[in-house]
Amino acid sequence: MTTSPRKALTDRMIRVDQAGEYGAVRIYAGQMAVMGNRAPHSGEVVHMAEQEDVHWRRFNELVAERGVRPTLLQPVWKVAGFALGAATALIGPEAAMACTAAIETEIDKHYTEQLEELGEDDPELGDAIRQFRDEEREHRDAALAAGAEKAPAYPLLFNAIRLGCRAAIKLSERI
């Protein structure tokens, strides 16, 4: 059975977005495991984590409804996401916010590119991506307002996390 190019495209989008949202859930779990509710802006972190969980659950539904194969890298993202969240939180609250700012900057770009590629071909998927992209932008802006740029070695941390995020996207699209 051959798959149409359009189905292959939407399957790839759903696969990578489900993986990414799972990674985000795990990052916030790692941050909260270290900081708990003691850190500045912990209420904001909890709110962002709850939104990421909603995003992940929606992509889980799309995976099931459309018969999309999830990424085989999910066990890696489970550990890597938690480790990234915990490590940045151990550096300090600003580093945890720098992590959020970096990832959400990259995800904004990623979701915007997906929307351009998708066009009007799949309104259900497009609406979900558009809503989640807008919420990811809010997360980035909240992280910046919470002092992300005050993190030690911010430019290095920010760009290293963005690079890792781009690599995770490329791997999860295919594997």
Image: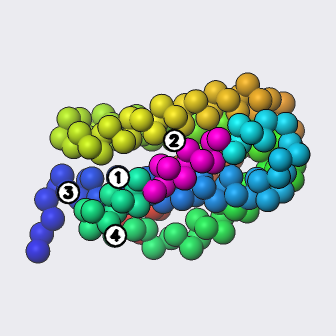
Q: Is residue 153 among what the camera can see?
A: no
Separation of residues labelled 3 and 2 (CA atoms): 22 Å
Work out whether mark 3 precedes mark 2 in sequence or the reverse, and give the earlier one. Answer: 3
Whether 175 is drawn above or below 155: the answer is below
Q: Residues within 10 Å of mark 4 (few under 14, many from 20)?
A: few
Residue drawn at (32%, 37%) of the image: 127
Q: Is residue 33 among what the camera can see?
A: yes
Instruction: Pick the quarter of the image with the C terminus.
Output: bottom left
Q: Residues within 10 Å of mark 2 (few under 14, many from 20)?
A: many
Separation of residues labelled 1 and 4 (CA atoms): 11 Å
Q: Answer whether labels 3 and 1 touch (C-beta < 8 Å).
A: no
Work out whether mark 1 precedes mark 2 in sequence or the reverse, and give the earlier one. Answer: 1
The quadrant where residue 151 appears: top right
Residue drawn at (71%, 28%) of the image: 144
Work out whether mark 3 precedes mark 1 in sequence or the reverse, and give the earlier one. Answer: 3
Work out whether mark 4 precedes mark 3 in sequence or the reverse, and give the earlier one. Answer: 3
Q: Which mark is residue 69?
A: 4
Instruction: Pick the quarter of the image with the N terminus.
Output: bottom left
Q: Name the residue tied to disc 3.
A: 7
Say if the magenta span includes residue 64.
no
Q: Is residue 163 left or right of residue 66?
A: right
Q: Answer whether labels 1 and 2 touch (C-beta < 8 Å).
A: no
What secondary structure is found at the residue carrying circle 2? Answer: helix
Which amino acid, by three-letter code, is at mark 1? Met
What secondary structure is found at the residue carrying circle 1? Answer: helix
What secondary structure is found at the residue carrying circle 3? Answer: helix
Instruction: Tell me which segment is drawn in magenta.
Output: 47-57
Q: Name the residue tied to disc 2.
A: 107
